[in-house]
Image (cartoon, helix red, strand yellow):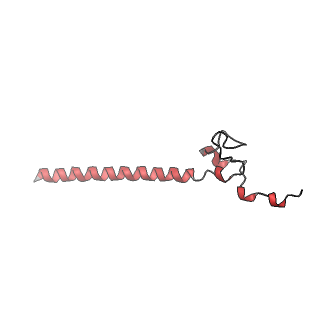
Amino acid sequence: MVWLIAYNLIFWSLVTLILLNYWQVFRSGWQSVRELHRIPCSRCVYFTGNYRLKCTVNPGMALSIDAIGCRDFENKSNNYEGTRKN
């Protein structure tokens, strides 16, 4: 009877540790995904979409974590081509 209680205790302790480990992995992955969604490159006018030259201004930091605070970022929706005088 004592062995049965000990085995149950060990089993449920291991199950709890495994579930806690999965939760921590999920949480850290979720935080990484949230940080990667802050990268503004795909919404920038200087972003080419070409895999050889991703950004014409800062190609070294394009699509990386360093691009989150890019000083040269200009939103694509702010194009002023319609107001240009010929």
Q: Is residue 47 left or right of residue 15?
A: right
In the rendered image, the quadrant that contains the C terminus is: bottom right
Residue at the image point whose x is 76% and y is 57% from the top: 79
| 23 and 64: which is toward the camera | 64
| 17 and 61: which is toward the camera | 61
| 19 and 83: which is toward the camera | 83
Q: Is residue 75 left or right of residue 29?
A: right
Residue at the image point whose x is 69% and y is 52% from the top: 44
Residue 18 placement (x, y as % from top left): 32, 50
Residue at the image point whose x is 57% and y is 53% from the top: 37
Residue 46 placement (x, y as % from top left): 72, 48
Residue 83 placement (x, y as % from top left): 84, 61
Q: Is residue 82 left or right of residue 68?
A: right
User: In the displayed image of the protein, which residue is found farthest to the left?
Assistant: 1
Residue at the image point whose x is 71% and y is 55% from the top: 76
In the rendered image, the quadrant that contains the N terminus is: bottom left
User: In the displayed image of the protein, which residue is found farthest to the bottom?
Assistant: 83
Tag count: 0
Residue 55, above or below 81: above
User: In the displayed image of the protein, which residue is found farthest to the right?
Assistant: 86
